[in-house]
Amino acid sequence: MSFLARANLVELSEEERVNASVADVADTPDNIPVATEPSPEPAPEAPPPPVLNDEECEVAGDRPLEEIFSSAGIPASPFPAEKMLRLLDGLRAMDASTRKAAVLAMDAADDNWQIADCVSDAERKIAAIEAYKQHLAAQVAGSEQQVSTQIADIKSGLESTTAAIRRQISELEQLLQREVAKEAQQTTSLEGTLRATREAAARETRRMATEIERLREITTQFGPV
């Protein structure tokens, strides 16, 4: 990372600059080991889709990834996947094989982290995002079920009310019209809420899919064959 920073390919944080200064003093060409590609840990299994109650069917847009990962209980990694993404972005000028060899060499030269740590972190985060996508799908399904039940109840109530009002003939005709208008307004409101929920979930799903594609570059290049 310090080499990439000196080449103006990446920007180091304050902590990384301090660590890079210490590493530059301690490391010499004689004590840098030969790069070997580690065997990453097995990918964690994605949790089952959540079962939502009525209060959990509202979709919260633009949920921070850090919050998603924290909720999934992902532990801190010696070399987070986001840091590897920054490193890979700094090496875009290289071809894929050279870029991979460079990263493996950096791994071998630094005992503080292993590529396997980064791969495991990426796999955990992909699993957390997949679980979040399932949660979004469950929210939409829960909203659809609620709205469908409520609309069916409203229509059923309307039919009963209409039958009763028709028996009272002319003096209750105005009451019938009010009930019809009420049903239409409630149905329109519920359908509008469902439409907004679907749109919010679709936006979040697209955003999560983009992040998965970015993270999957790590597992594709450094994960098990």
Image (spheres, rainbow, N blue to C red):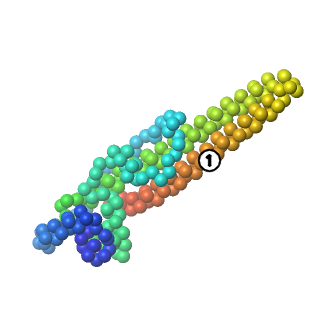
Q: Quadrant of residue 156?
A: top right
Residue 38 in the image: state x and y as whole percent: 25, 59
Give the camera-side residue of 207 and 64. Answer: 64
Give the camera-side residue of 122 and 198. Answer: 198
At 72% from the left edge and 36% from the top edge, which residue is drawn?
183
Quadrant position of the N terminus in the picture: bottom left
Give the camera-side residue of 189 and 92. Answer: 189
Residue 13 in the image: state x and y as whole percent: 28, 65
Describe residue 206's horizontal placement relative to residue 13 as left or right. Answer: right
Residue 208 in the image: state x and y as whole percent: 46, 54
Which residue corresponds to mark 1? 195
At 50% from the left edge and 39% from the top edge, which residue is drawn?
56
Q: Quadrant of residue 194?
A: top right
At 67% from the left edge and 30% from the top edge, which residue is drawn?
153
Residue 211 makes an appearance in the image: yes
Describe residue 223's horizontal placement relative to residue 22 as left or right. Answer: right
Residue 7 in the image: state x and y as whole percent: 28, 77
Question: Measured along the vertical axis of the image, is residue 159 above or below residue 208?
Answer: above
Question: Measured along the vertical axis of the image, is residue 30 above or below residue 221?
Answer: below
Task: Identify the amino acid type marked 1.
Answer: Arg
Describe residue 52's horizontal placement relative to residue 143 as left or right. Answer: left
Residue at far right of view: 170
Quadrant position of the C terminus in the picture: bottom left
